[in-house]
Structures are given as C-alpha cells and as structure tokens.
Amino acid sequence: MRTFFTVLLAYVLSASTLSAQWVQTNGPSGGYVRCFAVSGANLFVGTYGGVYLSTDDGASWVGVNTGLNTNVTSLTVSGTNLFAGTDNAGVFLSTNNGTNWTAVNTGLTYPSVYSFAVSGANLLAGTYGGGVFRSTNNGTSWDSVNTGLTNHYVLAFAVSGTNLFAGTYGGGVFLSTNNGANWTAVDSGLTNTGVNALAVSGTNIFAGTFGGVFLSTNNGTNWNPVNTGLTSTAVYAFVISGTNIFAGTIYDGGVFLSTNNGTNWTAVNSGLMNTNVNSLAVSGTNLVAGTNGGGVFRSTNNGTSWVASNDGMGNGDVRSLALSGTSLFAGTEGAGVFLSTNSGTNWIAVNSGLTRPRVYSLAVSGTNLFAGTYNGGVFLSTNSGTTWTEVNSGLPASTDVYAFAVSGTDVFAGAYGYGVFRSTNNGTSWDSVSTGLTTRYVQAFAVSGANLFAGTYGGGVFLSTNNGTNWTEINTGLTNTTVRALAVSGTDLFAGTNGGVFRSTDNGANWTAANAGMSGSVYAFAVSGTDLFAGSYGGGVFLSSNNGTNWTAVNTGLTYPYVFSLAVSGTDLFVGTFGRGAWRRPLSEMITSVKQVSTDLPTRFSLSQNYPNPFNPVSTIEFMVPQRSRVTLSVYDVLGREVQRLLDDDRDAGVFRATWGGTNSSGMHSASGMYYYRLTAVPVGGGESFVQTRKMILLK
C-alpha cells in the first residue's frame, strides 16, 4: 500500500493538466488588414492579429503565427521565403509558408517596417523613421541605405526594371537606380508629398497620396494628378489586373476602378460594408480588399460586387458586448454586430440594415437591441439583430454614440460632443437632456436606483436624479477626468479612467483612487456578485474581491492585453479586445475564496493541512508566501486529473486562505473520496520554486 501511494503521489505531481486560462473564441471575424502577399496558390494577409493564409483565394483563412505574435504591417515573397514586417518588432522570416517564423533583425535598427521591395537578389525594407534597409542574404543581416533619402518615413515601394521608387510620408517620391545605394528626389508636379502607395503599369507609375492619385510617364521626372471621379482622395493602396487599375481609399471612399490609366475613376463598392480600404491584391481571378476593422472583402467580378470573406479570421476589434438571455452580442470597429448563442463557439454577423459598421456601444431594453455607431447615430433591432432600422429622429446628424443606459422605460444615448439624449419610446424619437452638463463628450453611463451617472472625456462624472433633466458635476477627488467606464457594485460607484480606477461610496460626492495592483487605462467593468472586473488597455483584466481596495491581474492565456469591453454571460466572463476578437474564461477559475488573512511577512513557503478534514461541504486551505510569486493552487482526483484550479496568479508576500466547495471547474459537484491539493510557487524575482502536495477527503 505504501508503494502504491508513493507512485500515485508522483503521478499527481507530474500529471499534465489543462491550464486554467483565457481561451480565444472563434470570432468575431474581421479586424484590421494591413497588407497582402501572393505566392502561387497561397494568399497571405497581414493583420493586427498576425498572419493568415488562404489556399482558396480568400474564401477561408487559417492563422499561421507560430513564433509571430505581433501586428503585421507589410508582407513580401522572395522565392520560397515569406517576410513579414511588423509595427514594432522588425522583420520575421518564414521558409514554410508561415508555419513557423523567425525574427531576422541583425542590423535593422528601426523596428517599424511598413513596406518591402524585392529587386533581384536584394530585399529592401522601408521603415517608419529609419529610412531604407537592404539585405542581400534573405534577411540574415541588414544595412542602412539612405544616401540622398532626406525623408526616412518610407511607406511604399515600387520596382520598374532597374528603377526602385520609394514613397515617403511628407517627403514625396525618391528614385534609386542602384538598389538603394543612392536616392534622388523625383517630385516635380507632386503637390501632395504624403505618399502611401506606389504601383507600376507598363511605363506608367502611379502614386497614391493624401491628395489623390498622381501619374508619371517618365520614371518620376514629372507627375500629374489623375483624380477625375475620385471622390475620396486619401489613397492607401493600388493593385493592377490587366488593364484595370484599382485604388483603395480611406475616409469611407472604398475602392475605385480606372480602365484608362487613371484618366477616370469609378467607385466600385457594392457590398463593401467597410469602405476604409488599406490594401488590395489579386489572387487568381479574385480581387481582395483589406479594410480598417472589417477584415477582408472579395470580388469575383472586378469589383462590381463584394462579399465579406473572413471565415477563420477571428480577430475583430470588439468595442462593446451585450447580453440578452443566452444571446451574446458583440459590436465591432468596422465589421458591425455579431451574435453568438453558444458562448463564443460560433459567431454570425447580423448586419442587415446596419449601414454603419463601426459599433461602439450596445444596449438591451426588453426585446429591443440598440447599437450606437460612429458617424451613424443609433440603430434598433427588434429581432435579435436579424434586421436593423436607423432611429435617429432628434439626434444630431452623423453623430457618434459611445454609450447607452436603460432606466425603466427610458433609453439614454451619449452623443459624443452633443451630450445626453433620451428616448421614452424605444428610439422612435430622442430629446436632448443636457442641462448642466458642461462637458458634452459622453463616454459612459451607470444607473443606481434613481441616480443616473454620466462619464465624460475631460469633464469627469455628472449626476442626474431626474432622468437627465438636470445634471450636476461630481468630481471631488477625481484627479483624472477622462472617464471611459462606470459601474455600480453594491453601494459603491466605480469610474474607469486614463489614470486607473476611482471609487465613491457616496454616490459620487467624493472619490478615492482605488488602484492597488492595477495598471493601464480602464475601458470597461463587469460585476459578478461581490466581485468586480476591470478591463484595461495594455494591462488586460483585473479582479477585485474587496471593492477595489486591491486588484489582481487574471490574464493567464490572454496574449494580447488590450481590452475594450467586458461581459458576464452565465458562468463565463467575456472580454472584447483590440484586434484579437473575443476571449472567454470561466468565472470559477478567477473568483475563488482565496483571501489574504495577514500581511505579516512569512519567512518561508508552506502549505498547511486543510480543515476540517474529512469535510462536507467546504474545506479551508491555508498557505504562506514569503515573497511575490506566481502561485498556483489546484485540486486533483486520485488519477491525477485536475478537478479545479483555485488560484493561478501573482501574489505578494503574505498568509492566504483558500476554500474548496467540492466542485469541479464547471461547477459540478465532485464525488466522495480522496483528493489531492498542490501548491506551486515561483518567485517573480527569481529563486527556488516551491511545490508541495497534501491529501484531503470529501464526505457526502
């Protein structure tokens, strides 16, 4: 029996278990698409969520990011090599179609790479601030080649025979005839020197600028504007397909087509829901457009019509979340509204009638779902997003709605720059209710009984006790007045600001900073019982179980900690991120009864025997941590399978008590019998790790 117990204990200590952590859901799809590259039948796209590969001309995508976890701003193919330029991490190389990536930055002293060119055996990288770098050995090493290049913000390249052109931000176009060794400005006639894109078609060179399209027929010696029909002049991309030249524009201009070398342009945007186009490519017989927030759109008929083509690309920018029963809605930056009825396993776009795809706020009032948009006001759906209707009567034209509140039968909308508007008839009409609101840039609301709170940009918090008819500024102690989120938890009011969290215990009359353990600007809150979650931009998700007195990061597995929105749905917490879609984590993994019972500094690690033991239904486990450490406390069954992870976070020095109520990570009751609990502590500042396991008995 002693031998069996020794073997079993060894198995428990070494058993592989599923980590308690955040899991990225399968959407919402879309996101920021910065670039394309084509290699045979492979189409690659660079996004804020890394690189995706399509082998069916963009119909479906798969992430290919092993070794690459950063924003991708440029792509190019050289033979069998695929290169990715990133926003702040330099250049990465894949020799197996994106399956694996390796950083190749020796000599590359500027890490923001916005463009590439291949000229013979030379690979050129255009950086933002560092000019041009050249590699003659497939990225193994780089050399700066900037002689004559007076502007070092290089956004675009084009190659025409032995001529290499570089487009810069504010410096116009430069020409090199010796692979970048020397550069000469070629700007005559180029009246806008912010060059975002370059393209070569025969002997014609096109430059896309903030002032439209310019054409040179003599290798850049002279330029002439060719903008007839081009209603948006911020040109960010070109692609050439036979005699067709396509230009991608931003500021809601979409895609334009010229069939006569730029003499005339025609908008070709039917079906293009997002008309902020950063990139274009031709793959087979398909034309693909990469948008700013809406992901990829595909056309099979030279731009006559477009369809969203984001299957498998679950890296939408999720600005808002709302729950209606078991339906979870996500509002995205550029891709509209998405619905999941199975906890994020699947997301479907629900955008019929929603003509403005940048959705910054969502609210549910009975069977009504409201969407607040950028530049489009409010839309209403009465059928769970299946169809939408614009409901803007009384709202300023083309307003941005960043926040909603529902109080009884009243719906409040925060119109950015115009204050608060109220509807008493489900959005059929709106009335301004902003008296006393000295700052009209409303970003957040919270309701507590008869009190309505509004958080503003630069003006702090305002209170109305009469449904918005009058407002009073309540900022005593609120030292940061850029308020991005508000929440009520019990009798406490919390404000999320650029300076962290503030708490008021008297309905906003006085505020106190509540930031111990917190980092980043706070954009969102979620309340679960007596526990409060905060989502921060750069810091991820934080949990407080003591009304904001202390915060603990709960970010295990959340690889991109830029959080815009939070929502509790059933037993899970969802977060909406910037360019990485929605993530899910069970509340039971984060909300445990782990409490610090003493701040006296222990001199050693220790794990005490649980009490009572045997127990039913709850037992207490006490442990000591002598220095700040990554602490994991888990319960296992006799086969070494993890039943529940009670704690998996950083803890400061102290004495702690955890409770286990005999349930697994899904909240199901465990069977009677013997269990093991194990404490693992890894000092954050370095030092010897601590591991100890004890046994306990659950009786029923």
Image (cartoon, rainbow, N blue to C red):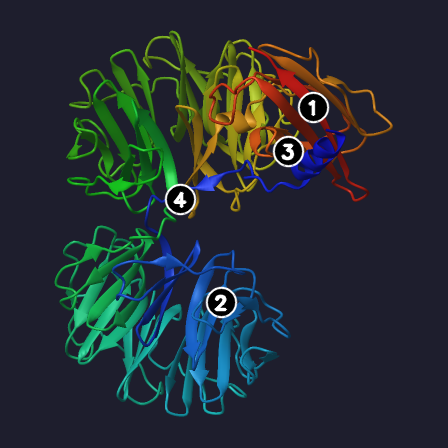
Tell me the element at label 1.
strand
Q: Amino acid at mark 4?
A: Gly
Q: Is residue 211 visible?
A: no
- According to the picture, the residue beneath numbered tag 2 turns out to be 85
Point out which mark residue 581 bears. Answer: 4
Q: CA distance from mark 3 to mark 2?
A: 34 Å
- According to the picture, the residue beneath numbered tag 1 turns out to be 695
Q: Amino acid at mark 1?
A: Lys
Answer left or right for 446 relative to 66: left
Point out which mark residue 649 bears. Answer: 3
Tell me the element at label 2.
strand
Nearest the viewer among 130 and 338 is 338
Residue 111: percent from left, percent from top: 57, 65
Q: In the rendered structure, are the residues bearing label 2 and label 1 in contact, judged by CB atoms less than 8 Å apart?
A: no
Front tag of 3 and 1: 1
Point out which mark residue 133 bears. Answer: none
Residue 419: percent from left, percent from top: 34, 26
Q: Amino acid at mark 3?
A: Asp
Residue positioned 31% across, 62% down in the render:
234
Q: Earlier in the sequence, mark 2 or mark 1?
A: 2
Q: CA distance from mark 4 to mark 2?
A: 22 Å
Tell me the element at label 4.
loop
